[in-house]
């Protein structure tokens, strides 16, 4: 277990379990924590579990059975369920089972959904390298693309993990995700160039992510404007214009005109918090 500079009693809790080895380090973010775990672990197979998520009791067994059935696979992927912050069930997203063209299909969309759904062979990660620390919110997707370029994978329908969703989740920070996905997709261009199928898959994926997180950024703008945080609202607007660009007018929203009117109205009419305090 890697304690990535937690300010709470994480290390003390870990000490209650004699079979757990706890490594404490200054905060380095998700990639830094995962890379430390990768370097310090010794197993032939690896899984990564974030602090706020949970594995099912049969996750390891289900993955190993999938490896046994597909000995050529470099990594195997199961299903996840989403849970609310309090642990209650939210939904059960299901992607199609991939059987071929793994890199091509992952370029179009992240069919893996989350790294907690994956078990890697150690040899795969030793070959493709560690998580990239400069991609702050999509390092797991970038890792999967790297692995899929070089190794086949196998997918199964066993639910192996519960992914906790809450208001502060990175996947709900649209402007941050737009920037991170732009980094990831830009890095893939050198690998798809000259291959018409991969180039088409890249274009589809690039459009998919701009639409997906462009929509979330629109909600983010509204949220900041309602709270009177004009600085963050404008920052999100700029991210929208820079990364989504012309597709701003094509985002798959219902009542798009109404939403943009509300964004504009919020930015124009929300009082400056400093002025409010002075008035009080």
Image: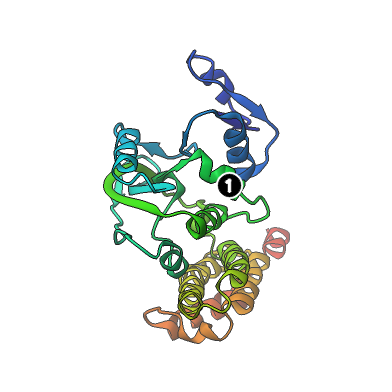
Q: Would residue 9 be visible to someone looking at this image?
A: no
Position above or below: 177 against 29: below
Quadrant in the picture for residue 2: top right
- Give the residue drawn at x 51%, y 60%: 149
Secondary element type, mark 1: helix
- Give the residue drawn at x 68%, y 37%: 27
Position above or below: 163 against 216: above
- Give the residue drawn at x 29%, y 33%: 58
Q: Is residue 190 left or right of residue 111?
A: right
The x, y position of residue 277, in whole percent, is 69, 58
Farthest residue, direction front: 72
Camera-nearest residue between 167 and 125: 125
The x, y position of residue 122, in whole percent, is 51, 38
| Quadrant of the rendering where the C terminus is positioned | bottom right
The x, y position of residue 21, in whole percent, is 55, 20
Camera-nearest residue between 219 and 78: 78
Q: Is residue 258 left or right of residue 173?
A: left
- Give the residue drawn at x 46%, y 43%: 120
Q: Would residue 23 be visible to someone looking at this image?
A: yes
Residue pointed to by mark 1: 127
Quadrant in the picture for residue 86: top left
């Amino acid at each position: 277990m890697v304690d990535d500079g937690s300010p709470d009693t994480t290390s003390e809790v870990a000490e209650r379990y004699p079979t757990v080895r706890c490594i404490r380090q200054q905060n380095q973010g998700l990639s830094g924590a995962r890379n430390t775990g990768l370097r310090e672990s010794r197993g032939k197979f690896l899984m990564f579990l974030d602090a706020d998520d949970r594995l099912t009791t049969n996750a390891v067994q289900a993955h190993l059975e999938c490896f046994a059935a597909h000995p050529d696979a470099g990594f195997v992927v199961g299903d996840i369920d989403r849970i609310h912050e309090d642990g209650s069930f939210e939904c059960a997203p299901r992607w199609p089972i991939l059987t071929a063209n793994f890199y091509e299909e992952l370029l179009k969309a992240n069919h893996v959904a989350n790294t907690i759904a994956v078990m890697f062979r150690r040899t795969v990660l030793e070959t493709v390298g560690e998580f990239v620390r400069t991609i702050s919110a999509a390092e797991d997707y970038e890792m999967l693309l790297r692995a899929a370029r070089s190794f086949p994978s196998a997918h199964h329908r066993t639910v192996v993990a519960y992914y906790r969703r809450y208001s502060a989740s990175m996947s709900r920070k649209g402007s941050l995700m737009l920037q991170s996905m732009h980094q990831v997709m830009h890095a893939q261009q050198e690998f798809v160039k000259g291959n018409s199928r991969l180039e088409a898959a890249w274009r589809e994926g690039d459009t998919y992510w701009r639409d997906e997180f462009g929509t979330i950024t629109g909600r983010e703008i509204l949220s900041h404007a309602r709270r009177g945080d004009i600085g963050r609202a404008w920052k999100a607007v700029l991210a929208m214009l820079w990364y989504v660009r012309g597709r701003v007018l094509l985002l798959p929203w219902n009542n798009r005109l109404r939403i943009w009117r509300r964004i504009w109205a919020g930015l124009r009419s929300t009082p400056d918090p400093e002025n409010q305090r002075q008035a009080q």
